[in-house]
Amino acid sequence: EIVLTQSPGTLSLSPGERATLSCRASQSVSSSYLAWYQQKPGQAPRLLIYGASSRATGIPDRFSGSGSGTDFTLTISRLEPEDFAVYYCQQYGSSPPRTFGQGTKVEIK
Amino acid sequence: EVQLVESGGGLVKPGGSLRLSCAASGFTFSSYSMNWVRQAPGKGLEWVSSISSSSSYIYYADSVKGRFTISRDNAKNSLYLQMNSLRAEDTAVYYCAREAGVVAADWYFDLWGRGTLVTVSS
């Protein structure tokens, strides 16, 4: 089973700043089959990025994903007020379990 | 409208049972693999179970194996999760989620329901 470790646990930033979130896998993720989700309080998760770097439909281009193998990054180029949320990575390239990282909370500084 | 709507959550005593449902609409339900994902209060996301489009492939997290059963009825556009021998640690919001496609490159979850809360307490 692939274990995903996200860092930092909490990121305190101001609107307009750049956010860099990390997701590290315990073993190589097949073909960069890694996704990122955003979750706001009281809401379901929303798909942001799949295939490590492809934006889902309707996701603004300030969100970008990169990485391969065991190290992946989600970058938010300029934080908007609506971007303060919890972000999860997930690997899906192998048979289940489809593991998630523990999440990174992006909070307003 | 493309959507998933969960139902069936509630308060149940330890050792009890509950059956969750997820109603799909706006897309060809029978073409997609489906999943259950849960989130304990204040915690992260935990994948629970998945079922392929024709129910040929079924998987469970170790934490629920032997106690939970996933199933689907493509004629009714519905996904189910039968939960038996419930424990306090099963308390969570349970989401159903759709896999985007049939090939590995599309096994991410592109559509989520709003969730249903299951509370296991005496």
Image (cartoon, coloured by chain):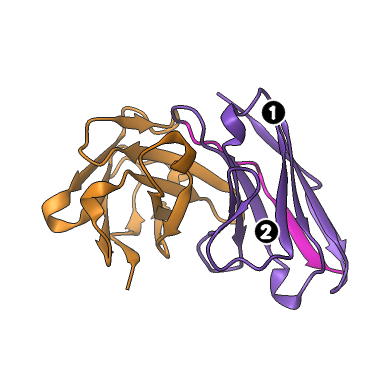
Chain colours: A purple, B orange
In this view of the protein, which residue sits in the foreground, B19 or A20?
A20
Expressed as whole percent of the image width and height from the top left, the position of residue A56 reads: 55, 58
* Residue A55 on image: x %, y %: 60, 57
Quarter of the figure that contains the N terminus of chain A: top right
- The answer to whether one can see residue B106 in this image is yes
Q: Is residue A4 left or right of residue A98?
A: right
For discs 2 and 1, the disc positioned in front in the rendered view = 1
Q: Which residue is mark 1?
A: A69
Q: Residue furthest left?
A: B75
Q: Residue at x 30, y 47 (%)?
A: B32
Residue found at x 38% / y 38%: B49
Quarter holding the C terminus of chain A is bottom right
Neighbour tally class for label 1: few under 14, some 14-19, many 20 plus, Cα within 10 Å: some
Q: Quadrant of residue A27?
A: top right
In percent of width and height, residue A72 lies at 73, 40
The prevailing secondary structure element of the residues shown in magenta is loop
Q: Residue furthest bottom?
A: A81
Q: Residue A99 at x, y = what percent? A: 55, 36
Is A47 part of what is drawn in magenta?
A: no
- Asked if residue A103 lies in the magenta stretch, the reply is yes
Q: Earlier in the sequence, mark 2 or mark 1?
A: 1
Instruction: Say if residue B92 shows up in the picture.
Output: no
Q: Front-most of A108 and B25?
A: B25
The segment highlighted magenta reads A97-109
Type of amino acid at the residue the image marks with label 1: Gly
Identify the secondary structure beneath mark 2. Answer: strand
Q: How many marks?
A: 2
> Which chain does the numbered disc 2 sit on?
A
Q: Is residue B32 shown above or below A18?
A: above
Report which residue position mark 2 lands on: A86
In which image quadrant can residue A61 be found?
bottom right
